[in-house]
Image (cartoon, rainbow, N blue to C red):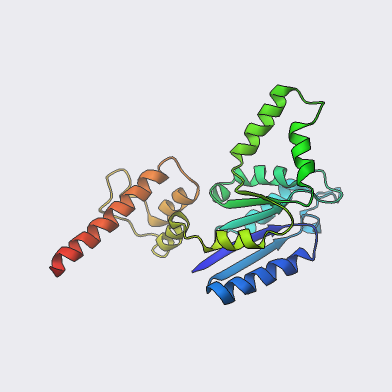
Amino acid sequence: MEKTILLVDDTISQKDVLNDLIKNIRRSEGINVIGHFVNPNNRNFWNDNKDPDIDKLTAGIAFKFTDSIADLIIIDQYYSDLTFNGLDLISKLRNIPKFKNSEIFLYSGKRDVIVKEIFNNQSLSDAMKVANLAKLINLRISQFLDKDFRSEALRSLKKVKLDNILPGKLRNVEEGKIQSFSPRYREIPMGQLADMIESNDMDSGNILSEIFDLTIAHYVKLNEGLQ
């Protein structure tokens, strides 16, 4: 089994933490984990004024996952000398189809500050606080952690998510089609089906349901032949 993890943090030493986590998971769980560490202060993400740019950062992350998906994304909330934070970045990533279903952790050594910014900001009206809370919920952040994310990351990466596995399997026969599908989907190449599942397309639920139904029917037929 192969999993991919992304860590976004401007503290370079956290790259060592990520590498140690990957080694431990490979050794103890037998999971081949591919890790990506991104420093938002990297000059590759600067704009023409040599300031860190969240759009360039988002595009850079998306480029890293051109041919893969992120099973787990871990993002630090606060960065030194930047005009954006982790929540801003998560909001950008969730707008990219490839990252709509990725599990995301937000972490910070200043969790109390984040809570105060959302709920105790006296300059915000109650309506704005409710709107901010709704936005936070819509980001679907799985965990809100202190600086140590290792144990929760291990639990996440050990989980088997069929809607993450299937797209890769379908792409192994990119141009093939599933002729046993209903007429709505049978002419769609498997590569395109994979894209629809990954992007949480409005038809992705029906596609997954049909795949599972066909798989179960296939094994039932095999079982009947053995009796």
Res 112 visible: yes
Q: Residue 21 occupies which quadrant of the picture?
A: bottom right
The residue nearer to you, when weighing 155 against 139, is: 155
Q: In which quadrant will I find the C terminus?
A: bottom left
Q: Residue at x 15, y 69 (%)?
A: 226
Q: Residue furthest left?
A: 227
Q: Is residue 26 above or below residue 44?
A: below
Q: Tell me how many marks there are.
A: 0
Foreground residue among 180 and 71: 71
For residue 4, above or below residue 138: below
Examine the image and state in which quarter residue 221 appears: bottom left
Residue 67 visible: no
Pinpoint residue 167: horizontal percent, then vertical percent: 44, 57
Q: Is residue 119 above or below residue 99?
A: above
Q: Is residue 193 left or right of residue 15?
A: left
Observer-nearest of 126 and 92: 126
Residue at image coords 76%, 64% = 14
Q: Position of residue 100 (x, y in %)?
A: 55, 46
Q: Is residue 79 left or right of residue 201?
A: right
